[in-house]
Structures are given as structure tokens and as C-alpha cells.
Image (tube, helix red, strand yellow):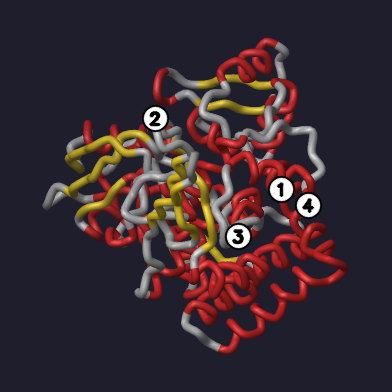
Amino acid sequence: MGIKYQSTNQSFPEESEARLEAILNSFNAELKTATFLFLEDSPKSGFSFRDDVSEVVLTDKQLNPQVFTAYCQRSLVPRGMAYETVINRARKFPASAFGYSITEAGKKYGQPIAALTLDYVVKNNISMFSILGSANTNGKTNSPLNRVKILKKANEGTFRDSDLSQEVNWGISSNISKNHLIPLSKIDFIKTESCGELNGPLTTYFWIPGKDPEKVKVIDGYLTKARIIAAKIKEIETSDNFKLAETVNLRPQEIKKILNGLEKQGFIKSKGRWTDERKSENVLLIKGKKFLDEYVSRVENCLADGPVLGELTEFYNYLKNTNDGQLMKDYLNKSTQLYIEASPHLNYRSSLKVQEEIIKCLKANPNGLRYNRLSENVSLRHVTFPLRELISAGIVRKEGKSKEVRYYLN
């Protein structure tokens, strides 16, 4: 019986942004970073990685060997951080297994940056997964790189959601708020201030020439604000729901009534389409700026063969060799614990816990929230059952019909 090795490898990118994306996708989760740091010159299986991590990370979670194999197959090998080796163990009727070993790019760039990643996570007490999100997302570029691009744009100054959606070359999915802005605001990297939540029909209104805003009659009890809205549409000739929401201090339902009234009175005409877009202004906070300065900038310098590469290489060797590697193990344990706490795949929240989060969310939003916005804020796709229990208990109330339904805290 013989053993035959057949290795495959993807080269590490040459272009700077592609290099950054490769690194961010390789180290967006601490369990994946730990997998990388246990790579050696000889191929290792998912079971070997599981055993290595289990000796270092103190957890009662059952770690599946397939998780480590998936990290290698889906992230580390495609980004040039690891080789994939097919091991044939028998000459006749060969039983094949996959093994993974470190590449030269992994040694040169991956190990130093992995050390920086652990250091940042431990010192700031936050999982990289909470910052960068999942690498398994759709689009030309995925979540980790998109999150960094958003923070960089915020570093240039305040921006709106629509500013991002116009950057089509980013490959960012349409639901920017849910996928990126809400997670970044939850960890205080950016501050998002709503300019009017009008998800639903996005309608553009056109002023009819020759009409006088001062001739607008009372609409559902509003006269002054109805005329202000009419004058605004006349001034800019066309407007949409979002722009009008910024004009007066009214709730979306009230604005909609006024616009319907203006159209009935013959002052405007409308043309609409459906959207789930929201308008909000986003500002970079201190923690977000610190992440760009202390992590992203240093990673980029390292990938450009700058002086940081040498510094981080020394730091990696320091972690690896201090107290026979115990310092590295301590960093791995602390950082992976943070990932276990943050990972939705490794954690289950009880219905009571979800209810507490819903109450906290509605308390912070006294004007109420739609179902989709509420589920986004508690990071769950469905919150129907917790909401029913809260409504039955008289803690939460529901107002409106169909797509206009909003939830309020009693």
C-alpha cells in the first residue's frame, strides 16, 4: 500500500484590492484564522484541525471536522493561502482524502496578518466576524470587502444609503442597510440617522404647470404643511417620497395622505415603483476610524511589502515562540471565544431573549417600525411568534393594515 500526493493551488492575487479581499475573506472569522494558523508544510485533514483547535479553545461546542475542511476549500485555498492535496492511500481501489498545507504567500503575508488580526480582536474585545460579516455572500465582491469600503467612504465624510447604491462597481447587494449599515451601527463603527423611513412604493411626483401652492385646500387636517410640500414639489418640479420626508416633520403615513390629497386636487401627478430602500445619513464613529487606522491600513501596508510586513512578521514569531507557543494559544482561545459568542451558526437565542431585544428596539424607535426593519434590527429573518406573544401580553401593539403595518411599544 502506498501514499500518493497530488496538490492543487490558486495563486495569491497581484492587484492590491484583490489582495485585501483575499485577506479579509481568510480572516473574517476567528475559527477560520485558527485553522489557518495550524496549517503546516505537510497536508492535514479536517479531523487534524479539529483536534488542534480543541486543544487550544475551551468550549462546550461540538466542532465538526467538516467546518475546518470548508474553511480551507471555500476561503483559504481559493485565496492562495493554502494548498489542497488529494491523498490516495491505496494502489488498488484508491480511497481519496483531502489534506491542506500552507503556501508561500500564506507564510509571507498570511501568518503576520493573522497575528495582527488576533491582536486587534483581543485588545478591542470584538470578533472580526462582527465587523466584517460572512464571506459567503452574493455579488461581485462580498461582505468583508464591502464593509471596509463603506467605512472608507464614511471616513471621507457623511454619506447616504443612495450614495452606496450608485457605486455599482462595488457589487454591493441592493439591501445595503440590512447587510452592512445596521451591523456596523450595532458595533458603534458608524452612526446611522434616518431621514425618513418610506420603504414600500417609491413614488415620484410631478408638479402640474400653472398651479398655485397657495390654492391648496385642507388635506386630512393639514393646510400649512400641505402647502409647504406643494411648494417644494413646484420648486424642484419633481420629487420622491424620501426627499419630501426631509421637508417636514411628519410620519410617512401622514405624508402619503397629503400627497394623495394633492393629486386628487389636481396639483401633482405621480409615477411609482416598489422599493425597500431607506434614506439615512451615515457618519463614521471613533471605533470605525480606529479599525481603519489600526487594522486595515496596516494590512494594506503589509500587502504592499511595506515596513509593516517586517514588524508583523516579528510579532508573529513572538506570539509563536513565547512560552513554547502558549502566548499564541492564549490569543487563539480568547479570540475564538469572541467568535463563538458572535456567530449565529454556533448560537441559539431563546424566544424570551428575542422578545427582550424587540422591546429594546421598539423603545429606541417610538415612531414604530415595520416588520422587516424590526427583524433586521434583531438579526432574525422571522419574528412572528415573539411578536404575537408580546402583542397578546399587551406589551406591543400593531397599527395599520397590510404593507402599512407598524409595531409600537405600549
Q: Nearer the viewer, residue 249 or 119?
A: 119
Q: Nearer the viewer, residue 366 or 383?
A: 383
- Numbered badge on residue 93: 2
Name the residue: 28% across, 35% down.
274
- Numbered badge on residue 333: 4
Q: Secondary structure at mark 1?
A: helix
Name the residue: 84% across, 62% down.
326
Name the residue: 47% across, 49% down.
135
In primary-sequence order, the first of circles 4 and 3 is 3
Per the image, the residue denoted by label 1 is 52
Asked whether the beta carbons under mark 4 and mark 1 sit within 8 Å of each other, the answer is: no
Tell me the CA gap for discs 3 and 1: 12 Å
Number of numbered discs present?
4
Q: Give the number of the mark in front: 1 or 2.
A: 2
User: What kind of residue is marked 4?
Assistant: Asn
Q: Quadrant of residue 232?
A: bottom left
User: What kind of residue is marked 3?
Assistant: Glu
In this rendering, position of residue 229 left or right of residue 34: left
